[in-house]
Image: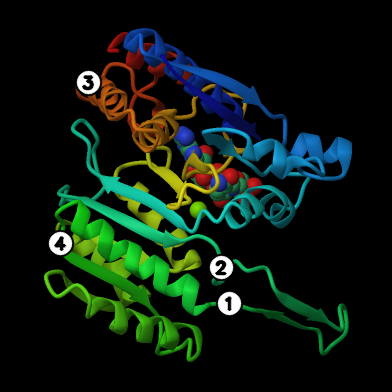
Amino acid sequence: MKQFKLNLIPGDGIGVDVIHEGRRLLDRIAEASGGISFQYNELPWSCEYYLKNGRMMPPDGMSILRDCDAILLGAVGFPGVPDHISLRQLLLPIRVEFDEYVNMRPVKMLPGLHSPLKNETMDFVCIRENSEGEYCGKGEWKNEGQPDETVMQESIFTRKGTERILRYAFEYAKKTGRDNVLSATKSNALNYSMVFWDKVFEEVRKDYPDITSAKMHVDALAGYFIMHPERLQVVVASNLFGDILTDLGSAMLGSIGISPSGNINPEGKYPSMFEPIHGSAPDIAGKGIANPMGTFWAISLMLEHLGCKLEADKVMEAMIAVLTEGKALTRDIGGNATTTEMTDAILSKI
Ligand code: NAI
Ligand code: MG
């Protein structure tokens, strides 16, 4: 019997609903497999926690969090607490301190999904830098409220951080039999960070002569996502560019509620964290209509990461079965099922 200890952070808004359903899915997987079990440690860290305690997690939060096989997160952020506080005091420290420098985001058209694009052929992976870049949080706010008020937002791109993510993208392509890597840049305007990014890209790509690769300015690349999604295989991008491109990717699958995100520490020194790419969706929070598929797909990525490939595949197959039947879909993908009804349908396929 393999037992996995999971730290769960439901967070805010629909994060709470989708993690609740995610737990049911994991219980069902454990029951069906007979060989694995999950022990959950559910942590109440959220905006509600912040309003009571003045912080998003307790002072020893990171050491509590470290003690597990993987972390599953819903979403954080809610009106009443500024978004930069909720994100910068919870999600970003986990990604950075646990050196989860790879943010893996597949964009794959599953049978039964309907893209808003005419061309529905898409099966690619975005590999987003997750530990530095535009989200380093450094900057300065000068002369607040004065006529010469000025803010500076810095980006940090280190050789270590840049090279390892670019190399990971090529290695990932090699490992998964893909033969093209596209790098998102903007070196025409960002004359330090992206010129450096391109320089390291040039160096790294030389080590992978069997993989075709190119750089593309991120604005043109956004257009390319729409015009030629079938040509994309592996896209590698900085923290900010990857964030934006992957919401686009999920929307191309039909809803932002579908796509997963794996925050990976490839060396396994720290736990990796899995989450849907969407946020806490305050506009539909408490209505019971959130699409749980982004979380289920994230659970599938987590199971694969934990070495349970068979169970990871089972989750995807169950989702696809429900999608193709088309009877228990949430509103965002054209049905009228509730979050729980869709989950029930998926569980019944396992
Ligand atoms: P969002 O992803 O929460 O919502 C964008 C739109 O997509 C909304 O109309 C929402 O109803 C819809 N949507 C999102 N997930 C859905 C689902 N599973 N099923 C059906 N519809 C869904 O992004 P938004 O509005 O920019 O951010 C809301 C809050 O979430 C903010 O506080 C933000 O900071 C936070 N956020 C947190 C993230 C995280 O914890 N990883 C990621 C993105 C945003
Ligand atoms: Mg995002």
Q: Nearer the viewer, residue 117 or 240?
A: 240
Q: Residue furthest left?
A: 210
Give the mark, 3 or 2, whose residue is nearer the N terminus: 2
Give the mark, 4 or 3, whose residue is nearer the N terminus: 4
Helix, strand or loop for disc 1: loop
| Mark-to-mark CA distance, 2 and 1 | 6 Å
Residue drawn at point x = 69 percent, y = 29 percent: 43
Q: Nearer the viewer, residue 5 or 212?
A: 5
Q: Which residue is mark 3?
A: 321
Helix, strand or loop for disc 4: helix
| Mark-to-mark CA distance, 3 and 2 | 39 Å
| Mark-to-mark CA distance, 4 and 3 | 27 Å
For residue 156, which numbered disc appears in the image? 1
Which amino acid, by three-letter code, is at mark 3? Ala
Which amino acid, by three-letter code, is at mark 1? Ile
Count neighbours of disc 1 (C-alpha within 10 A) and say few if under 14, some if 14 to 19, many if 20 or more.
some
